[in-house]
Image (cartoon, rainbow, N blue to C red):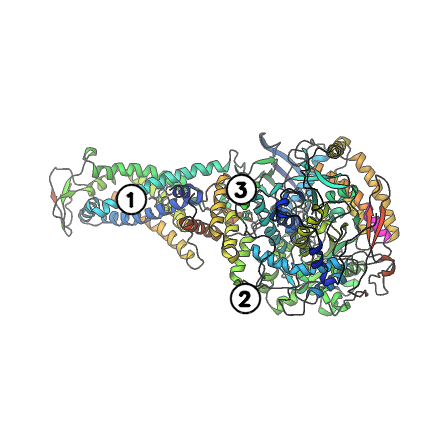
Amino acid sequence: MVLDSKLPEGPIAEKWEKHKFNVKLVNPSNKRKYDIIVVGTGLAGASAAASLAELGYNVKAFTYHDSPRRAHSIAAQGGINAAKNYQNDGDSIYRLFYDTVKGGDYRSREANVYRLAQVSVNIIDQCVAQGVPFAREYGGLLANRSFGGAQVSRTFYARGQTGQQLLLGAYSALSRQVAYGKVKLYTRSEMLDLVTVDGQARGIITRNLLTGEIEQHAAHAVVLATGGYGNVFFLSTNAMYCNATAAWRAHKKGAYFANPCFTQIHPTCIPVSGDYQSKLTLMSESLRNDGRVWVPATKETAERLRKGEIDVNDIQEDDRDYFLERKYPAFGNLVPRDVASRNAKQMCDEGKGVGSTGLAVYLDFADVIKRTSAEAVSQKYGNLFDMYAKITGENPYERPMRIYPAVHYTMGGLWVDYNLQTTVKGLYATGECNFSDHGANRLGASALMQGLADGYFVIPYTIGDYLASTPPKPVTTEDPAFAEATAAVQARVQQMMSINGTRTPDDFHKKLGNLMWEYCGMSRNAEGLRFAKQEIAKLRQEFWSDLKLAGTETEMNQALEKAGRVADFLELGELMVDDALDRNESCGGHFREEYQTPEGEALRNDDDYAYVAAWEYMGDNQPEKLNKEELTFENVKLTQRSYK
Amino acid sequence: MAGSNPNAKPMNLTLKVWRQKNRVSEGGIVDYKVKDISPDMSFLEMLDVLNEDLLRQGQEPVAFDHDCREGICGSCNLFINGRAHGPEQGTTTCQLHMRKFSDGDTITIEPWRAAAFPINKDLSVDRSAFDRIIQAGGYVSINTGGTPDANEIPIPKDIADRAFEAATCIGCGACVAACKNASAMLFVSAKVSQLALLPQGHVERKTRVENMVAQMDLEGFGACTNIGSCAAECPVGISLENIAILNQEFLSAKATSNNLA
Amino acid sequence: MSWISKTLTSSIGRKIVMATTGLFLCSFLVVHLLINLQLLRHDGGASFNFWAEFMGTNPVIRFMEIVLMLGFAVHIYQGLALAYHNKKARGAQGYVVNHSEQNSQWSSRNMALLGTLLLIFLIIHLMNFWVRSRFDAFGGLAMVKVPNMDHPVGDLYSVAAASFKIPWYVALYAVAQIALGYHLWHGFRSGFQTLGLKHPKYTPAVYYTGYAFSVVISVLFALVPIVMFFDDQYQPRPATGQTVEQSLTEEPAVLR
Ligand SMILES: Cc1cc2nc3c(=O)[nH]c(=O)nc-3n(C[C@H](O)[C@H](O)[C@H](O)COP(=O)(O)OP(=O)(O)OC[C@H]3O[C@@H](n4cnc5c(N)ncnc54)[C@H](O)[C@@H]3O)c2cc1C
Ligand code: HEM
Ligand code: SF4
Ligand code: FES
């Protein structure tokens, strides 16, 4: 199959307008004859479900949470980008587009990113109209802050809870449609398979997490907005339940998986404190606006510090190395995430790390507190500081925070064309679930933007193009494909229940996480990746022979839920390793040690790797097939990214 | 210093956990022991330890809701030693850390209890009543697209800030759990006052409060008697002022709306 | 008029009824207390009897009395109904361990209990004074002549003075005032909150007024029977069947 990204013709600034004119429309009275399934009620899912229902489609929305409002989007802290140029500092749609393509290390599709920048301005209008309480200036107008990878202030925020406020906005729009009866909401329902009929997505199979019942749902089209797969690493900033199951099941039913190895490691997270650690907590990137990152200038000082012989506040200015400011004078502490993360790791590798484990660097607010006041800092970051204090038991107003990189976001995901349609007809993917707009590295405050762009302003147009060519006949679950898929899901559940081995799902998950972090994490090399591939395969076998569960499958059974997710992670993990092995270059979040500049920066290979790697499932225990979508850049010049 | 202190002394604890098979069965307290709990662990990580032990022994782990473990999703909801979200003020269960407890402690862990929050299993309860209250009117009725420029309506900073404070409710239900009357007024008032404060919410001001309160009553929550346990236990500090605003909104809506039903 | 009944039976509507009646009852307490304090004048009850007669005969006051009775009835009915509804909302299974004392005040959690205590007291209290003064069948009052009144009036003072020599009655009265104090400690500010009257500028004042109000009212109410119990000066007049003349300045005739 040739990958057709369906990019519209014409100059980049006109593509989306033209495309909107060219897509087929479903006439208003016919819309109510179409059913659409939306899986996921995060920013991408809730906004899509609400907008589609407003248009008149019948929507069924699914989430494994007990309420749509709990989707992981709620946890986003820092902000959302939009090219409003309210600050008069030279921002524009083109600049946002340019920054995003550059920030993604030239591995994203120009046209998609340009469209994202275009609709970014509508998102802010939409959210404000919903009553989202963004931060404001004294004059009553909206405030902005700056974020990594950009030299303008274009990030809209609601203190440290931007994701929460945006999600509650989308949730309210969704709730309104539920009240109108246009959206039927299925909570605590987990999609466990996609049903395709004649190569078209026609429904899903779900498990009711309260009763264990396996249920069938049919529709004319299916939208997956199921979030990212960062939890392959066990420890990440993602919520505990985040998983890849929906996307992975769709992948096995024919949807290509793109760039799985592109994972983002966020530089500012609270370090691991022990092996009981269940997740990692992000300290928003916005902190780097005011916090200064440093380590002791020498190994010796760092060692004494770790042993507790000296206190951090005893270390004099000239005994500190503000390594980001030193190496990147233009961007300083605000370099993109991949750069900041790698540098922190490098410092720790050199023995200058702090904290009992030596796996941390400082993020210091002493200067800004001196310059302004503790109150002013609390106004801006109060909730983050409180969170830090609760978790670590340390007061960040008095001692610098200890931070370390952690897995945060997955740029990879289901391959989609310009319409956000996957390689399965009638199956769409939005939000973090797709691979689209961030290339090899996502800029801060761009995921919220993308999720909402997809849901509010892209899918409502593009899905019509597909539906218009599908007859508005009712779809049912009568097709044998539904029974087949249901039987397969049931068999898998029962198989897991009947192994009765000795190891818990978490046990396998932790092992997998360690392997992934060690060999497919912040930096990778061919040898390590090959080793990891073998180990993962082994672990997968052990999983299917030594898994331990309790209770039954016909009731609420959280260990069973977890086991199903881990089983899919064990397959996806291997694909990530394959992808990382294939990509013999360093770009963005993918740092192959073999490919670096003399200064240790990522060394891209545009001649051979300016493509999207779209992996095709070929059957159980078969190697996946690599399909390439070549990326062409007509509007930005490919350069070595420099933030010096 | 905790967090940086690998020598913090591990604790042994006795847990008294409410176990209940499903919505209709009887429940009861079951005692468990957990050992070597690090003070740096979060409360839920301590429960993870218990659950891993149980599962390895072939027993069913304790069901409880949680997700973000950052205090923002509102999933976690445990009644710990007689307090919603445990002893530390302004803290969700997931952000509670074991350094708040001491070696040898006995900790009682129960689910939220309220007629409107039926128990699913063990410590997991059904809070969908909250969703239905929001569905009754917790929104501004605008469709996607066609909205005016975001800076068209200036909003005084202090109003925006107050609306934001109200909007930070995480929908956890601690207010209901802690309230003697199992009243959902704090939750409802947070949404009502957020939208009553902002100009965007003014158009539907009256119908919103009428419908949301009607749904709240229908769900079987109790009536507020201004005890204040809710605000004292609310992990994000939603203030009682919001309930006053709700009362005001309700009274003036009822007195002046065109709704005769 | 279904919107009215719907409003009044909604959870907030019920509360608004509680608050308006409750605060109205507070104003009644002030009047009641002022009259009770007349008991402590050293005038053999002349002032007290004067005001008691005034309250019993003035048409405006008589009208307000009906409002007051209604107020009590509604407040009590609604209070008990609320308590019942709220108990049901809490669910069948209570907490095994509950430390609500760590998040709220005792008085706030026990309004229904306090109210019920008040109700019991109220019944006994009414039987003793109000019923007696209004309905001759229940004992009636001796008649006295007081200044500024052209006709003889009932000697309610003697009923009070006699009652306040009975230890259990004084004790009951005092305990009831403790209950009243706690009821108002929460009730006063709560009424304002219910009516949506909350403002950072004024609410602190409401709180302090409420606390002061509850203490002053209940202490003064309790003081009257206690003083009269311990002070021999306050004695009921023996029922002679004749109208006794009283003056406001004259020291009471000490009857032994
Ligand atoms: C701590 C943190 C902070 C962040 N801060 C920012 C920020 O400041 N700015 C920014 O732009 N981005 C930020 N991000 C990234 C951003 O939050 C996410 O990428 C984005 O919210 C993802 O939204 P989504 O709608 O695609 O998925 P999610 O919000 O993850 O939603 C997934 C939904 O799918 C459902 N689901 C998944 N699988 C299934 C299944 N099998 N069956 C049924 N339902 C399913 C879930 O229940 C959920 O409703 C942050 C991320 C993290 C982890
Ligand atoms: C002198 C008599 C009384 C006065 C002055 C009084 C005053 C008040 C006030 C001001 C409130 C607060 C209302 C609110 O929060 O909105 C209140 C509440 C209450 N009262 Fe009374 N009350 C009196 C007698 C009674 C009696 C006899 C009962 C009998 C049961 C009672 C039961 C209650 C209850 C249950 C509440 C709590 C309900 C609530 O807070 O909404 N009260 N009272
Ligand atoms: S008001 Fe507070 S306690 Fe109640 S649901 Fe919201 S956050 Fe939880
Ligand atoms: S788990 Fe999300 S708030 Fe506690």
Q: Is residue B180 visible?
A: no
Q: Nearer the viewer, residue A263 or A473?
A: A473
Residue A108 lies in quadrant: bottom right
- SS at badge 1: helix
Which residue sits at x=53%, y=53%? B166
Q: Is residue A473 left or right of residue C13?
A: right
Q: Are marks 1 and 3 on the same chain?
A: no
Rendered position, B202 above or below B49: below
Amino acid type at mark 1 = Val
Q: Nearer the viewer, residue A162 or A50?
A: A50
Identify residue for label 3: B177
Q: Nearer the viewer, residue A316 or A587?
A: A587
Q: Position of residue A580 (x, y in %)?
A: 83, 52
Identify residue for label 2: A138
- Residue depth check, mark 1 versus mark 3: number of the one nearer the observer: 1
Which range of residues does the magenta coloring cover? A574-587
Identify residue for label 1: C67
- For label 3, the crowd category at 10 Å Cα-Cα, with few meaning under 14, some 14 to 19 and many 20 or more, is many
- SS at badge 2: loop
Is residue A405 on the magenta stretch? no
Amino acid type at mark 3 = Ala
Is residue A586 on the magenta stretch? yes
Q: How far apart are the two marked residues, 1 and 3, measured between alpha carbons? A: 38 Å
Amino acid type at mark 2 = Tyr
